[in-house]
Amino acid sequence: MSQAPAQFYRNRCRAMEGAFRQLRHDLASPLSGAALHLEMASRRLAQKQESELDRAMENVRIVQQEVSAAAAMLDVLGEMAHGDEETLSVFSLAQIVLRGAERHAKKADRNAVHLVLPQAAPEPKVFGSSSRLEQAIADLTEHALLQVPAGNSATWRVEPRGAESQAILIWNRAPATRSERLFTLTRGAHGEPPNAGLFLARLSIESQGGTLTAEVEGDRVRAVATLPVASE
């Protein structure tokens, strides 16, 4: 266990490098869009024709939208850097999943969604930042509850798998809901700034040496966080 903190920070460094690459890629689109529409607005205004004013104003509106999306992505940098000095420990994965999911139990009740939680158990244990992992579980739960139609369920379970353990969330989604690029900074269907919650959830799990994946089959989504079991 004496080498576990060093391994955690190596994992976190690799996860941060991947997140920065993804952030750079995702920033390119709104910035390129803003530059393009600024050029179009400039050309239309240069014509000094009243008929071009409405089109120029539409270009400016799109620029504002693109800049807003880019600013939201840059805000993620502050969230990524937060908590670097946090306490590392060995903890029960089931307990952290339970605590993270319970944050949104009232929201599930309000939405008439049945939130199924795992039972608290001492095993399996993992090493890392319990606060970051709990936040990741909470963000995943919140995302699922926003998609689950009333009367349906979102189910968490924890499964030991030898040297690894898995926290699995399964939920039904409304058919029109998009789940492509679930853990990236994907913008809304109408160009809204992206929600960083799931992007940061993946970063937190990868920082602990784990992986976060999702499978979409029809109206069913299965998200799996796989983490190494803490060694003695």
Image: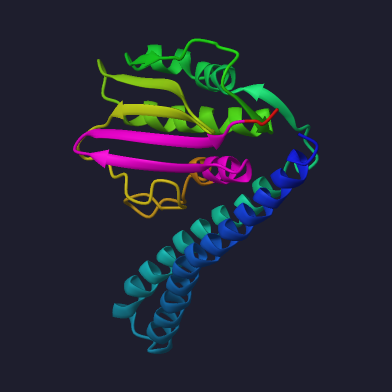
Q: Position of residue 81 (x, y in %)?
A: 71, 49
Q: Is residue 130 above or below residue 207?
A: above
Q: Residue at x 25, y 15 (%)?
A: 151
- Location of residue 179 by image quarter: top left
Q: Is residue 202 above or below residue 72?
A: above
For the N terminus, the image quarter is top right
The span shown in magenta is 200-229
Q: Nearer the viewer, residue 99 or 72?
A: 99
Q: Is residue 44 left or right of residue 26?
A: left
Q: Is residue 216 magenta?
A: yes
Q: Nearer the viewer, residue 168 or 2?
A: 2
Q: Position of residue 3 (x, y in %)?
A: 77, 41
Q: Is residue 225 magenta?
A: yes
Q: Is residue 194 above or below residue 55?
A: above
Q: Is residue 122 left or right of residue 129?
A: left
Q: Nearer the viewer, residue 229 or 153?
A: 229
Work out which residue is located at the far bottom of the displayed protein and give it: 47
Q: Position of residue 111 (x, y in %)?
A: 35, 17
Q: Nearer the viewer, residue 2 or 58?
A: 2
Q: Residue at x 46, y 14 (%)?
A: 118
